[in-house]
Amino acid sequence: MITSMTGFGSGRREAPGLNLAVEIKTVNHRHLDLHVRIPSEFQGLEAVVRKALATRLKRGRVDVFIRIELTRNSVRLEANQNLIASYVKLVEELRSQFPISGDLTFEGISKLPGAITVSNQDMGPDELTAALSGHLVEATEAALEQVQDMRAREGVALARDLSGRIDAIRSCLETITQGAAGLLDHHRELLLKRVAELAPKLEVDSNRLEVEALMYAEKSDIAEEITRMGSHLDQFARLGERDGEAGKRMDFLLQEMNREVTTILSKTSGLNHSGAAIGQASIDIKVEIDKLREQVQNVE
């Protein structure tokens, strides 16, 4: 079944000296759009999170919020003195050339990428990164399980709504099909009425009348459009029953449906009773297509 792109999940992991939390929020987007917010001192772990997300999600905007807390009695901060010295030197050079004010504080230095390294009293930076990576993947996977569960539940509701609207379009298409069957008779009656108005004493050649009626009927023939609409509806319904990414294909089919129903309207405009019924059914289809396109925007 199809899945929604709306979901939320959270995961936590605790270990001696460590509290780690991951929250994931997803909404609709044309492509997979990842945004990971992780403390600057652990930026090197962002790639691990992105890989875990990309293997499970195909579409949608994904916002990930990561909180990593190391208890004070297990934390060791190390300064990259060469890097900091380079920053300080750069600041002094810039001040000599430009009117830059303000002091370079420890808080400012701590925000510089790579300036301050966080490690554990019992582990070096590499060991801590390896340990954090494992816990981070586990928390991310736990959050993703909740996200996908919610997206699946939303997908069931979406599929139900889409199916109902497709059935409504099929009903309108049946009305159009029935109306199209009477177009030849309509043109024949229209010609007879017109002849009677313009030349009431003129004898009408029945063969000639049939030819003229057929010519007019051919201009308003919508059999091909009806057939293609039926095919698009069948394809759309099958997409709603399959697993995996379906949103983009659904959106394309809706564009094609809209094109067919627009052609039907243009071919049958100006006709009286038959055309009015076809026109109203076509307008109803357009309304349903617009509602479907809104819903499909949230289908993965």
Image (spheres, grey):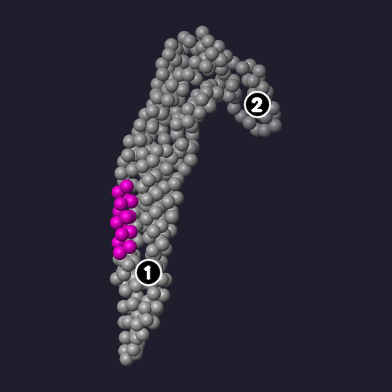
Which one is in front in this view, the residue at disc 2 or the one at disc 1?
A: 1
Up-down relation of residue 49 to residue 273 (above or below):
above
* Residue 251 x/y as whole percent: 43, 49
Which residue was labeled with disc 1? 269
Asked if the stretch drawn in magenta spans residue 175, the answer is: yes
* Residue 191 x/y as whole percent: 35, 80
Question: Type of residue at label 1?
Answer: Ser
Up-down relation of residue 3 to residue 224 (above or below):
above
Q: Nearer the viewer, residue 31 or 166?
A: 166
* Residue 129 x/y as whole percent: 53, 17
Up-down relation of residue 282 to residue 74 (above or below):
below
| Mark 1: few/some/many CA within 10 Å (<14, 14-19, 20+) | some
Callout 2: helix, strand or loop? helix
Instruction: Examine the rendering and report whether any part of residue 105 can be seen.
Output: no
Q: Nearer the viewer, residue 223 or 296?
A: 223
Residue drawn at the location 39% of the way across and 49% of the way down: 235
Residue drawn at the location 34% of the way across and 89% of the way down: 203
Dominant SS type (magenta)? helix
Asked if the stretch drawn in magenta spans residue 174, the answer is: yes
Which residue was labeled with disc 2? 91
Instruction: Examine the rendering and report whether any part of residue 51 can be seen.
Output: yes
Marks 2 and 1, the one that precedes in the sequence: 2
Residue drawn at the location 37% of the way across and 68% of the way down: 268
Question: Type of residue at label 2?
Answer: Val
In this image, 75 relative to 226: left or right? Answer: right
Residue drawn at the location 39% of the way across and 44% of the way down: 239
Callout 1: helix, strand or loop? loop
In this image, 133 relative to 186: left or right? Answer: right
In this image, 38 relative to 158: left or right? Answer: right
Q: Quadrant of residue 300?
A: top left
